[in-house]
Amino acid sequence: MVYFDEQPKSKMSDLFGREKEVEELMESLRKRKLTLILGLRRTGKTSVLLTSLDELKFPYLFIDFRGLGDRMYYTHQDFVNFLERSFTEFLKRHGDIAVYLRSIEGVSIRGFEIKFRREERVDLISIFNSLDEWAGKKKLKLIVAFDEIQESKKIVGLKLQPIIAYSYDHLSNVSFVMSGSEMGLVYKFLQVDDPKAPLYGRYISEIKLENFSEEKSKEFLIKGFKQFKMKVDEQLIKYAIKKFDGIPGWLTFFGVESVRKKRIANEKEIDRILEKATKLALLELNNFLEFHRATERYKILIRTLSRGPAKWSELKEEISLREGRTIRDRSLANLLNTLIAHSIVQKEDGEYKIADPIMAAAAKKL
Ligand code: ADP
Ligand code: MG
């Protein structure tokens, strides 16, 4: 039982304060065919997902799209290599599925290693049909987990939606769970409200992870330090909580660093951790800017919001002033919606603001 570990948790005993969410997710995985788990970066989505799967004891295929890497685009071949790794892991746990998969054209299995034929597209529908058949024979439900699903759009030509829709309609023993940090992009990916989209009208149950409250953050840190028999310094804990704003991942990192030093990180060191967090957020921001047109306009918006929440009219004025002519409402709406979709900006009480304090610190450095 250790809270301060940088890896995502996969055991209930290592996961703090998410009993309700794990219970909800398990319930949904039992009953529903499509489940979403949403929350900003480092709120613990992967941890809640892995822990729920572990508790549930259903067989599962885990596909972590962050595992693809940092590039902007991936080829189908990259995807195939990546998929082979996930399936190989599955085969190690459930060797008897080999018989089912082997009969699919383009699939070959040697030992636990699975290979998909190079030149063609992987026939995911046949593969999911086999998984369904296997699970049905065993009277089990099989879960396919897509972690950070919005990243799958980087794979050129891959269309997962029709495959998920097919499975929803025809496979009774397979359910899907998808996580995403960039909520707007996840909804855009699923398109359940678009009558022309494959997943239109399908029911998706949703679980949202919030940051820890101040009280919960405190309890988490105190319990975490107790596990390592470390003396708790209330002042420093208070300082850390103020700085990390209840983001579970950064609170954990603060714990990990303190354990490494064998004493609780002091204010200076906390600031340094915050700097590291800010650097990461800045990297994300620059990544976003690099791959979007209208870079300058985004920069103006982000910089303006880094000074505090702002109204539509203020943002409009700021851009218009800089450019020397009035920006069209439609253009501004597009820019803001894109920032919201990427979980960089949030709209709250009619005002726009940077989504979290670490992103806000990064925005100041842009
Ligand atoms: P996400 O998938 O949302 O980015 P992760 O599950 O990877 O978040 O969690 C980020 C970090 O925070 C990991 O080191 C993880 O171990 C830790 N963590 C997150 N939530 C909890 C929790 N409830 N209890 C203990 N550690 C947590
Ligand atoms: Mg994750």
Image (cartoon, helix red, strand yellow):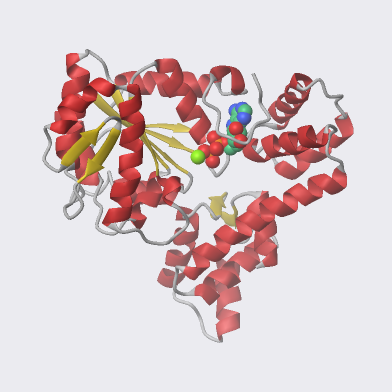
Give the number of marks. 0
The quarter holding residue 2 reads: top right
State the image coordinates of residue 195 (x, y, percent, origin top left): 19, 48
Task: Relative to 135, say whether 190 is above or below.
Answer: below
The quarter holding residue 231 reads: top right
Q: Residue at x 43, y 44 (%)?
A: 148
Task: Relative to 356, say whether 282 is above or below.
Answer: below
State the image coordinates of residue 137 (x, y, percent, origin top left): 17, 15
The quarter holding residue 237 reads: top right
Q: Residue at x 72, y 32 (%)?
A: 214
| Residue farthest front in this picture | 111
Q: Would residue 55 be found to the left or right of residue 14 on screen?
A: left
Q: Is residue 172 visible?
A: no
Q: Nearer the viewer, residue 59 or 270?
A: 59
State the image coordinates of residue 164 (x, y, percent, origin top left): 23, 39
**Quadrant (top left, top right, bottom left, bottom right) of the C terminus:** bottom right
Q: Is residue 75 visible?
A: yes
| Residue farthest bottom in this picture | 324
